[in-house]
Amino acid sequence: MTASVRVGQFHTDLRFRFRHAAADRSTTENVIVEVTGADGVRGYGEGCPRAYVTGETVATAKAFLREHGPDIADSVTSVADLQSWIDDHEAQIDANPAAFAAIELAMLDLLGRQSGQPLEGMIGAPALAAPVRYSAIIGDGSPCKTRLIVGAHRLIGFRDYKIKLNGDLDTDRRRLRALPNRARLRADANNLWPDAAACTTHVRALGQPFWAIEEPVTAGDTEAMRAIANDLDVRIILDESLSRQGQLDAYAADPERWIANIRVSKCGGILRAVRLARRAQALGLGVILGAHVGETSLLTRAALTVGQALETPPLAREGAYGTILLRSDICRRSLKLGSGGRLSPETQTLSLAPGNGLIVEAGRVNWHT
């Protein structure tokens, strides 16, 4: 395939500041890739490099795409070709998953538009049909701000909540009181505590019925996380600790204790995310389809495809906030959840539209190459 590649950044402010133990974010940090085929058809992809998740930055993502983007665009003419490139460059993608996700999504979009197939058809997954329900994600704000944000989510009709923990006992207690009494509740600590004892002491003092806790200690500290799971009788969600298949071995002995948080950007694109999620489920782990704060509709759309490819539905989904959170979206029609925290793909005509089915406003991107 003779194709050209452009790399740029999409920048927009968030409608409200989003904070957790590892980051404080008020703007987006997204890398966008445009691939144009010889026939003039264009495909678009997105990655969200996060230094505290995969060690990537916008600069390293751009460097990866400058080095490998032209080769991918010229050599890939099918999904099989794309999978072969992934298999041959595993180490490079492991070090640059968000960067690769951006060009993989662009190539799948391009190939889908050229062949007239939606993303699901490209990878042999069932077509989008039923609405999907998302979790409310509550950042680490003041108790007053938390009450306001939770109030807005209650009006929408959310049933499932994830709250970022602060580590200050009084503050966390006051913030948790804002949540609905019958909410299905999980917590995210973003590697907050130094050891298992500090975590269990804090969580017990909160007295909340969390069904899962995400990344309570240093990423990869499997023994501390296992101790927390056993002491609190709770499942542990693996996010920063799990981005590729080789890391699953550490959790195979007691899979009922673990849940894999699968984010398309963190895992290196749709194909790798599907492989990781399927392998996790085969081992007995649960799966959540996650999202980075500030994702545009491009990554929301990609996560829908991953969900369609799973044998068992995910335990929860994150993301799909679109212009509820973003001041503007890269897509003409932002993919965003509605009543009950649900997104109805058929209302967006995504189930039949070729590629990702989205109309990208390329003029909103600051193109560099």
Image (cartoon, rainbow, N blue to C red):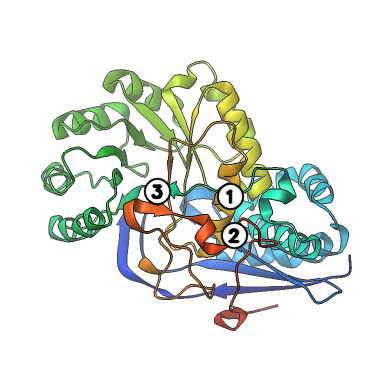
> Which residue sits at x=78%, y=42%?
87
Does the rendering let one see residue 292?
A: yes
**Residue 254 percent coordinates (x, y):** 47, 17
Q: Which part of the image, by quadrant, shows the N terminus?
A: bottom right
Residue 134's disc is: 3
Judge the density around disc 1: few (<14), some (14-19), many (≥20) Cα neighbours within 10 Å: many
Vertical relation: 343 (above or below) 11: above
Does the rendering let one see residue 325?
A: no
Residue 350's disc is: 2
Whether tag 3 and tag 2 are in contact, CB under 8 A, the answer is: no
Q: Residue furthest top?
A: 253
Whether tag 1 and tag 2 are in contact, CB under 8 A, the answer is: yes
The Cα atoms of the two marked residues, 1 and 3, are separated by: 16 Å
Q: Amino acid at mark 3?
A: Tyr
Looking at the image, residue 36 sits to the left or right of residue 155; the answer is right
Q: Residue furthest bottom?
A: 363
